[in-house]
Amino acid sequence: MKILVVEDEPEMLDNMVRSLEEEKYVVETATTFDAASEKIHFYQYDCILLDISLPDGSGLVILEELKKLNATQGVIIVSAKDAVDDKVAGLNLGADDYLPKPFHMAELHARVKSVLRRRKFKGNLFLELNNLKVDPNERTVYVDGELLTLNRKEYDILLYFISNKNRLVSKTALGEHVWGDQIDEADSFDFIYSQIKNLRKKLKEYGAQLEIQAIYGIGYKLLVS
Amino acid sequence: MKLLNHTISYLAAILFVVVTGWAALLYYNLLDEIYDSLDDGLENYKILIMERVEQDSTVLQRHSFGEFNYAIKPVSGAKVFSHTDVYTDTLMFMENEQDMEPVRMLKTVFEHNGSYYELRVINTMVETDDLIADLMYSIFWLYLGLLAVILVLNNFLLKKTWEPFYKLVHQLRKFKLEKQEQVTFEETTVDEFRELNQAVAKLIQNSTDTYLSQKHFIENASHELQTPLAISLNKLELLVEENNLTEEQLRLLSGAINNLERMARLNKSLLLLSKIENRQFIAEEEVSINKLTKTLLDDFEAQAAYKEVSITLHEEEECRLQMNPDLATVLLTNLIKNAIVHNHHNGAVTVSIKAHQLTIENTGDKNALDENRMFSRFNKSIKNDGSTGLGLPIVKAIADLYNFRVQYAFDEVHKLTVYFQVPAR
């Protein structure tokens, strides 16, 4: 899987590249509009992370060029602007998703995976993890072929963990992802603990071969051997 | 006291002094002129009588006034030379008035055939007390008349002249910096008003500019903070993912991450507030408050369950509003979140929806909140470490934007009511 990261802030770029490389993606970078424009004309990517505000041009123009090229990759707009107009314009120009800064790395991975799934496999992909099988279209989970009944939130938590397997997921990132942006006002994410407890209980009951490990004070990690 | 009445009271005092002084002057001048003319008449009469005496000596026998206006009596030598013409005021009994009335009398001495006679000629006089009374009476009416005219002039002419001033004051009273309304100035030919208008226009312009630049500063600052915050947070996340950290190191890192996240939340809320106040949420559509409330309550279910807070929803009527859907969500989220967070274990939250109002009640602190301070930014009247202190200010900002009214009441439970239609006053 090849990913292009277009970002002018070097530190931000470094963070994203390091984190994505851990997931074994091939990561290329562009820090200016010109460099990005050149790359999309010469190479093919599976996913592009695109910063809207570049020093020498707008990321929205890159989107227009991509549309002209009839390229098939997924595009996620990454922006500090958090402006509704940018979001709407970006999505109208064919972007798949919009991720406002600041974001959690776990959220980035979840979005990238979701885009790759949709684009590359047209969504017809079962996620398989040891004896666990997830059907994202039907939102169903099977353990050894047996249907595991999860409520909406539990399913979202599990999918998020799977997107970030063997990676730390902070309580905040999880809370924001599963309960939506407004939950970040919730001041305390302690309530997530009880949700995780229920999920763990169900996974154990059905004998799923994965473990949700608590990382002190920060969050959780899905351990898959 | 109005400026108009101020001038009138001064004018009344000044007029009183002027009119009274003028009346006194008039009185003395008038009297002087009357005396002058009376005395002339008496002198003329005297000459006529003395001519008469030359022709008819019986006249000398008129010792008392009787029906005539003069009396003559002989006098002895001693008095003769000490006397010249003397005019005096005296009183005489008048048959018609049946009273003593003032008369003007000329007393003189003349010689006839070697004998000396005293001649007294009289003429009826102005009754000064009547004159004063008449004068006072006229002056009183003149005074009242003048005041009435001034009052009328003030009320009609001056009011018309002052109209631009009152219109300006009326607008300034309603002027609110944050609403960015335009103040319109009346055309006026009065220099003072024109200067006032210019001064006010300049003041408003300066204040508005300062206000806007401050607002934009907050917005820009929040904006610029986003990237460094994102970088720092992500760096720490990458560090935590290095699997070789001790628990103590993780504890320190978790502290740093939690505080950075809190800062990011704070920053986001500030940005949101700025955007609401800058009216950057434009798109409106019909929002079903009932439906939205149900969705949000569902989202908060886990949190409520964790705190063991029971939530009840009373949908008494259907409430539909024309507003920005994002802001509707933010508004309700903040209200619900507030009710859950500032609650105690085993507490309760009740949400009631009517056609034009939403009430949210929650148990919690045993004391009422300060209604004046609860909507101001960073007012942490309630101790809660994770709170941004911006939840209710955001509610207020959205309410202000759409002219909703938010009312707080405390009756064992805290009760916040949002009136979506401000009742006509």
Image (tube, coloured by chain):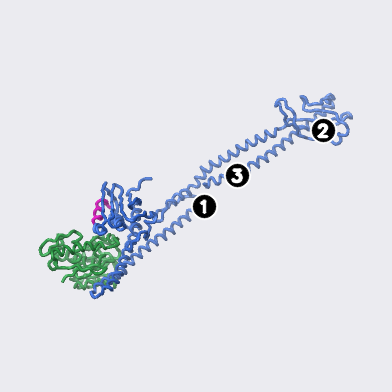
* 1 and 3 marks on the same chain: yes
**Residue reaching furthest to the left:** A145
User: Looking at the image, is mark 1 or mark 3 nearer the viewer?
Assistant: 3
Residue under numbered circle 1: B192
B145 horizontally vs B162: left or right: right
According to the picture, the residue beneath numbered tag 2 turns out to be B108
Residue A40: % across, % down:
22, 70
Q: Chain of mark 3?
A: B
Q: Amino acid at mark 2?
A: Thr
Circle 1 crowding by C-alpha within 10 Å: few under 14, some 14–19, many from 20: few
Q: Residues within 10 Å of mark 2 (few under 14, many from 20)?
A: some
Q: In blue, which chain?
A: B
Secondary structure beneath dot 3 equals: helix
Please name the amino acid that badge 3 sits on: Ala
Q: Reading the chain from its start, which is encountered first: label 2 or label 3?
A: 3
User: Would you say the magenta stretch is mainly helix, strand or loop?
Assistant: helix
The mark that comes first in sequence, 1 or 3, is 3
Q: Chain of mark 2?
A: B
Can residue B292 be found in the magenta stretch? yes
Q: Which residues are magenta?
A: B285-298
Report which colour depicts chain A.
Answer: green
Residue B250 visible in rendering:
yes
Q: Amino acid at mark 1?
A: Glu
Residue A60 in sight: no
